[in-house]
């Protein structure tokens, strides 16, 4: 299905579902309080489909699918006949208008919970939290290949996605974090990642790379996939598994490259232990020094790894009742992570976590390729984020309207038209600036 829609198609599907549900929240609560809804529109621009119900509400599907709106009867926009004043939005008590404004984000939170519940009932395939390659700060902290992550900063880790999200949040905070692991030999260990040493200006992906923990499932086994016929290892065969070099184990191709570089000496053979068709074979190979194609000079034995594809080896699945609790816990964890990112934006000026529709489109496409459960999980997180962002006290967002209504409660009368207009302008400028930063992060930001 991804091949048909592509990134743009999945972006339209994702935004269409979430925005429609958001606006449906405003619509339902407005009607509940007797406000006359003039139009419920999915999308902006020229209407493509149009239908009117018996209560005079026009339902529209418009040309530009990236959004939607609910238009209510309101004296601030046009003259309202006297007999309809009781149905005007601006004539309703403040508390009702507050609930109408809050209904959009509330429905996004509800949708997020339902989608997470469906995800966990279906079963979310994932990678087990097993450490493969170790580098950077993780190597400094003593992590070893084969470690199984149990807790990050006190929070339980069930999958590599759990670990990645917790580590990304901790990395953004630039504070040391304790990680509990089960070692390859079965013992437990508590290790501290010195995340305060991370360079500034990194986004979440770059921060995780600097942390230096990589999943074992992405490691390439040291199995021969191609042999140069005139190379030092011409006696090797496709499918041979290189178990050790000079007695040092090489379970992964990355280990093989490292050991060859460390042990190679001019005109001195390396002793390779090979598993071939169920038998152990001993072969001596003398590397030659040359350029592998990147302009460097290092020891080479003339083989390439057998290509592999990382496969999910874990499943987060619960029964319908247990999935309720799992969904609530996941929402809480994601809420804290998103709120923390937004806090850093406004208190520290850290905008590396902001992303535009470009990132949403590519992530939606990738999630769809990983299967229905991952796409539902992606929609759930996006819906949660949309709800949180809409509660920010920025004019033109629902949170801005709620702020206006609180001020109205304190003053005892609505804010002036001039104040509202200034607020709208400030809100547009602020949101426009954040959008520009998000597009910069996704399209133009140079890699450090």
Image (cartoon, rainbow, N blue to C red):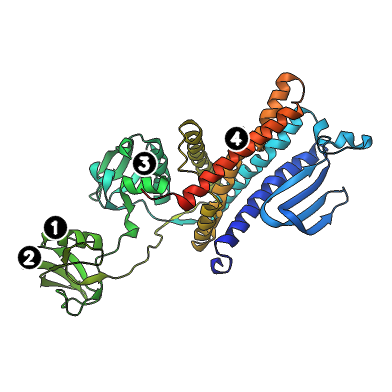
**Quick check: 104 left or right of 212?**
right
Query: Do we see residue 158 in this rendering?
Result: no
Choose between 88 and 320: the one closer to the eye.
Answer: 88
Q: On screen, 344 above or below 6?
A: above
Q: Residues within 10 Å of mark 2 (few under 14, many from 20)?
A: few
At numbered mark 3, what does the secondary structure look like: helix, strand or loop? strand
Q: How many marks?
A: 4
- The x, y position of residue 17, in whole percent, is 65, 53
- The x, y position of residue 232, in whole percent, is 14, 74
**Quick check: 78 left or right of 126?**
right
Residue under circle 2?
266
**Residue occupying the point 71% across, 43% down:** 25
Q: Residues within 10 Å of mark 1 (few under 14, many from 20)?
A: few
Of the two numbered discs 1 and 3 on the same chain, state the one appearing first in sequence.
3
Residue under circle 4?
392
At numbered mark 2, what does the secondary structure look like: helix, strand or loop? loop
Of the two numbered discs 3 and 2 on the same chain, state the one appearing first in sequence.
3
Mark 2 to mark 1: distance in Å? 12 Å
**Residue occupying the point 59% across, 40% down:** 431
Label 3 or label 4, whichever lies nearer to me, is 4
Label 2 or label 1, whichever lies nearer to me, is 2
Residue under circle 1?
262
Of the two numbered discs 2 and 4 on the same chain, state the one appearing first in sequence.
2
Label 1 or label 3, whichever lies nearer to me, is 1
Residue under circle 3?
151
């Amino acid at each position: 299905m991804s091949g048909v829609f592509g990134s743009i198609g999945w972006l339209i599907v994702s935004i269409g579902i979430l925005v429609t549900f958001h606006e449906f929240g405003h619509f339902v609560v407005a009607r509940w309080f007797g406000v006359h809804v003039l139009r419920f529109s999915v999308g902006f621009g020229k209407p493509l489909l149009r239908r009117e119900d018996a209560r005079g509400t026009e339902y529209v599907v418009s040309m530009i699918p990236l959004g939607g709106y609910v238009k209510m009867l309101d004296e601030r926009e046009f003259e309202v006949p006297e007999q309809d004043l009781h149905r005007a939005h601006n004539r309703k008590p403040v508390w009702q208008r507050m609930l109408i404004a809050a209904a959009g984000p509330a429905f996004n939170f509800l949708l997020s919970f339902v989608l997470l519940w469906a995800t966990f009932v279906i079963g979310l395939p994932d990678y087990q939290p097993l450490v493969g390659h170790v580098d950077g700060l993780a190597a400094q902290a003593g992590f070893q290949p084969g470690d199984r992550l149990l807790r990050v900063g006190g929070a339980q880790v069930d999958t590599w996605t759990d670990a990645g999200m917790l580590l990304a949040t901790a990395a953004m905070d630039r504070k040391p974090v304790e990680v509990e692991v089960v070692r390859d030999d079965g013992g437990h260990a508590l290790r501290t990642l010195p995340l305060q040493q991370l360079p500034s200006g990194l986004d979440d992906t770059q921060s995780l790379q600097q942390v230096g923990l990589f999943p074992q499932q992405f490691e390439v086994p040291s199995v021969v996939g191609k042999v140069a016929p005139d190379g030092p290892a011409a006696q090797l065969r496709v499918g041979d598994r290189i178990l050790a070099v000079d007695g040092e184990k090489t379970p992964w191709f990355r280990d093989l490259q490292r050991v060859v570089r460390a042990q190679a000496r001019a005109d001195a053979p390396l002793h390779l232990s090979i598993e071939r068709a169920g038998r152990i074979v001993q072969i001596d190979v003398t590397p030659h020094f040359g350029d592998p194609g990147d302009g460097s000079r290092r020891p080479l034995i003339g083989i390439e790894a057998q290509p592999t594809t990382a496969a999910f080896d874990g499943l987060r699945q619960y029964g319908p009742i247990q999935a309720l609790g799992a969904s609530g816990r996941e929402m809480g964890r994601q809420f804290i992570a998103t709120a923390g990112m937004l806090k850093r934006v406004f208190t520290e000026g850290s905008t590396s976590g902001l992303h535009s529709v470009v990132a949403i489109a590519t992530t939606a496409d990738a999630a769809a390729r990983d299967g229905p459960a991952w796409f539902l999980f992606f929609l759930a997180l996006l819906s949660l984020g949309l709800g949180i962002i809409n509660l920010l006290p920025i004019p033109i967002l629902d949170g801005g309207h709620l702020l206006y209504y609180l001020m109205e409660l304190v003053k005892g009368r609505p804010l002036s038209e001039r104040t509202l207009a200034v607020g709208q302008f400030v809100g547009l400028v602020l949101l426009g600036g954040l959008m520009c930063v998000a597009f910069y992060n996704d399209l133009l930001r140079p890699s450090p």
